[in-house]
Image (spheres, helix red, strand yellow):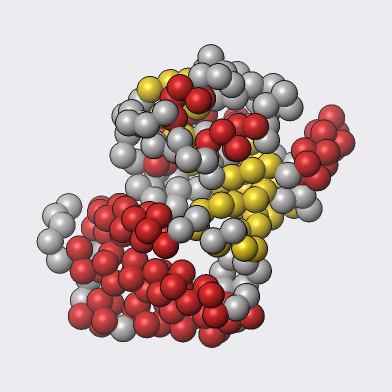
Amino acid sequence: MITKNAGETIKDALDSVAGWAGEIVVADDKSQDETVAIAKKYTDKVFIHQENNLGKQRKYALEKCGFEWVLVLDSDEIVSDSLKSEIDNFMPTARHAGYLIPFQTHYLGRKLKYGGESYKKMVLFKKSKVVIDPALVNEKFVVSSGNVGTLKGKIFHYSYRSLGQVYKKFTDYAIRDAADRIRRNEKTSLKKIFFYPPHMFWARFIKDRGFKDGFFRIPLDLGFAYMEFLTYFLMIFKKK
């Protein structure tokens, strides 16, 4: 787990794996709240390491892991009992280098099923078999050798807890994403600034049927449009 100012959620995340995981490793980016104090109640493998690049921070944390099999968990995620049982049952005879796990996203305490919020990520793997994309945001793990399987048990994701928290999160993501796109030599344009945001809302709420979750999610999908706008707008001012 990598953390920064995660005091609001980290206890529930660590509770979901305490006593089950062989070890818990936390790499913290100099949190200013109680994140580190809470983490130290669960493990003595808490490392303070300042790093803005999330991919590099993941790599640092992975190097601290003493086991071959690693489950990556964010501080706002909870491992379901069904997933833990599933992992316990297949692990002795695991045939793949990594496993995709389905995520159940929650927004304002309610489950989301549509509009891009039904997805799987490979967050369980043999650490010797993966490489990490060192992105400033949306970093991911890629299997360098071997096959990838799929599990049924879920990880519950509480990423969207209040509108204020959502828009603060999206602002941070936009700042990171703008810097990352510039690093990859991408250019911004008036088209991207003014046409991509409404397309983002349309894609999530209409094309991917976000409306089936309910109209209560409109502020969330507007938030994604806002993040899209801010990303390309900030690219005007940022330098490589």
Apparent side of residue 7 relative to residue 141 in the rendered image (left or right): left
Work out whether 131 lies above or below 218.
above
Work out whether 148 lies above or below 220.
above
How far across and down, in percent of the image, does residue 3 sit?
44, 35
Which image quarter: residue 12?
top right
Q: Nearer the viewer, residue 86 or 20?
A: 20
Apparent side of residue 238 relative to residue 68 in the rendered image (left or right): left
Apparent side of residue 89 relative to residue 73 in the rendered image (left or right): right
Q: Nearer the viewer, residue 184 or 166?
A: 166
How far across and down, in percent of the image, does residue 38 sit?
50, 25
Q: How many marks?
A: 0
How far across and down, in percent of the image, does residue 36 sit?
44, 25
Q: Nearer the viewer, residue 24 or 97?
A: 24
| Residue under the point 35% across and 77% down | 197
Q: Nearer the viewer, residue 85 or 150?
A: 85
| Residue under the point 46% across and 58% down | 162
The residue lying furthest to the top in this view is 44
Whether residue 147 is visible, yes or no, is no
Which image quarter: residue 49?
top left
| Residue under the point 56% across and 52% down | 158
Work out whether 78 lies above or below 120.
above
How far across and down, in percent of the image, does residue 19 sit?
72, 23
Whether residue 41 is visible, yes or no, is yes
| Residue under the point 83% across and 38% down | 85
